[in-house]
Structure formats: structure tokens, C-alpha cells
Image: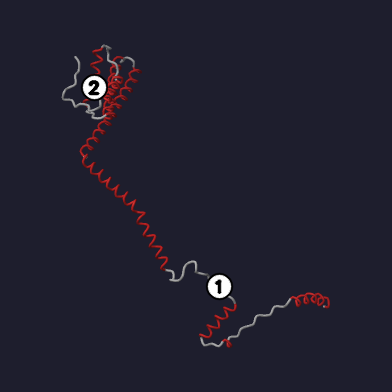
Amino acid sequence: METQLHPSSPPIDLPAQAYRHLVHTLITLLPPPPDSTPESLQTRNHAAIARVAALAPVNAAEAELAAQCIAARAQAEDVMRLIRVHAGDIRLVLRLNAQYAAMVRASLAALSHLRREQQQRQKREVTHNTADADESLRQTAANTMLEALTAAPKAQAPAQSASNSDQKSHLPRNETPERRRYPEPATVASVNALIDAALRAANVSPAMVTRKPAAALPDLHTLVMAAKTQPLARLAR
């Protein structure tokens, strides 16, 4: 008796090419039936497709996870059959038990991954309108920032002109940076003139201030004569 898909089963909403590829991949992953008759192969394939459809995948990613889950479960069932066939070989049974446990874990992992993907998809479908609103807000914010970015150089130009006007306002009317000159270095005459002006402002006569004249430096002739007479004076002693 052939297994037929129940009409109430949810259809797999996939493109035709993706659906055919999924079916061929699933068939190659399934273990061979006990007898290699065409009827047994058809029954195995229809049963696997029905089990995949029962997981209700609606896109290519979910269908692939569902096929992995069903294929791993079918491999585990085939290993269990081999355990019963070789029940007398303890070592082989132990290896088959380990393989069976690994296949079951792989099937459950694929199933849990599929369920998480479906939950995320359902959440996205529920919040589809909210997601559209958020996307429009992001687009508006991005456009606003782009407009502000293009307007920034125009706003910086008046600011620079204002700073230049402030620098010009600190200069005298008839003075420019090129016309500014550094003061000349002070001399002895200029310092004496400043001192005399300060004394006059304080009602002090410049004659009352005693200034020590600078000691006159000996000339070159005097130094030469002193150098000649100094050795003679030492010899006389």
C-alpha cells in the first residue's frame, strides 16, 4: 500500500527547481529499503516527503533543515534495524549503538534549529508593519543627516569670515600687520634720558644724583710698558 500525502498537510511554498533539488537530495540521504523493489523505494520516498511536509517548511532554508532532520532520523532507524540483525556481535552492537545515538542527536539538533528559524520568521511576519515603519524612520534619519552633511560647508564659510572680521577689529584703523615694527634696542643714552625724565617728574634735580664715572681703561702703550718693567722690578728684589 502506497503512502499518499494528506490533502490537509500544509504545502511547501518553494520554487519548482528548489523543490526538485530538495527531493533528490533527500532521496540520496535516505538509507536503502530492506528490499530493493520499486514499490519499496516509492513507499520510502513518499513517507519521507510526508514527514518533511509535516514540519511545515515555507522557504528553502527551512526545507533544508527539515530534510536533514528526516534523513538523520531515517539513518538512526536503519542503524536500529542493524542492531537487531547483529544482536549476537557485542562489539558491533556497541559501535552501532554509538552511531544510533549520534544520528538521533543530529536529527534533534536539526529539528531544534528548524523550530528556531520558524519562530523568528513568525515574529517577523507579526511585526512586518512595525519593521516597515522602522525602515521608513531609518531612511528619514539618513536623508536628514545627509542633508545636514551637505549644508555643513556652507555654514562654516560665514563662521570663518566672522573670525577674520574679529581679527581685523583688534587692529588700529591706520595700522596693518605689515606696518608693525619692533622697538629699537635700548642704548645708554636712551636709558639716561629715561632716568632724567623720571627724576624730573619726581621733582628731583639730576645734579643731586651722584653717578660714578666709569673707570677709564688703560691704553695699549701703558699696558706694553707695564709688561716690560715688571720683570725688572722682580730682579731688583
Q: Quadrant of the C terminus?
A: bottom right
Q: In the image, is residue 210 above or below residue 52? A: below
Which element carries disc 2, helix, strand or loop?
Answer: helix
- Looking at the picture, tell me which residue is in the foreground, 99 or 60: 60
What mark, if any, has residue 49 been given in the picture? 2
Q: State the separation of the CA atoms marked 2 and 1.
A: 104 Å
What mark, if any, has residue 199 been given in the picture? none
Q: Residue at x 34, y 15 (%)?
A: 89
What mark, if any, has residue 184 been given in the picture? 1
Amino acid identity at mark 2: Ile
Q: Residue at x 24, y 35 (%)?
A: 121
Q: Residue at x 53, y 83 (%)?
A: 197
- Looking at the picture, tell me which residue is in the foreground, 187 or 34: 187
Label 1: few (<14), some or many (≥20) within 10 Å?
few
Count of numbered labels shown in the rendering: 2
Q: Position of residue 74 (x, y in %)?
A: 27, 21
Q: In the image, is residue 180 above or below residue 92? A: below
- Looking at the picture, tell me which residue is in the foreground, 153 or 207: 153
- Foreground tag (2 vs 1): 1
Which element carries disc 1, helix, strand or loop?
Answer: loop
Q: Residue at x 24, y 33 (%)?
A: 118
Q: In the drawing, does residue 141 fall left or right of residue 227?
A: left
Q: Quadrant of the N terminus?
A: top left
First in residue order: circle 2 vs circle 1: 2
Amino acid identity at mark 1: Glu
Q: Which of the 4 quarters of the picture holds residue 109?
A: top left
Q: Position of residue 235 (x, y in %)?
A: 83, 76
Q: In the image, is residue 201 above or below residue 45? A: below
- Spot the residue most to the front: 174
Q: Which colouring convention does the figure follow?
A: secondary structure
Q: Position of residue 95 (x, y in %)?
A: 35, 20
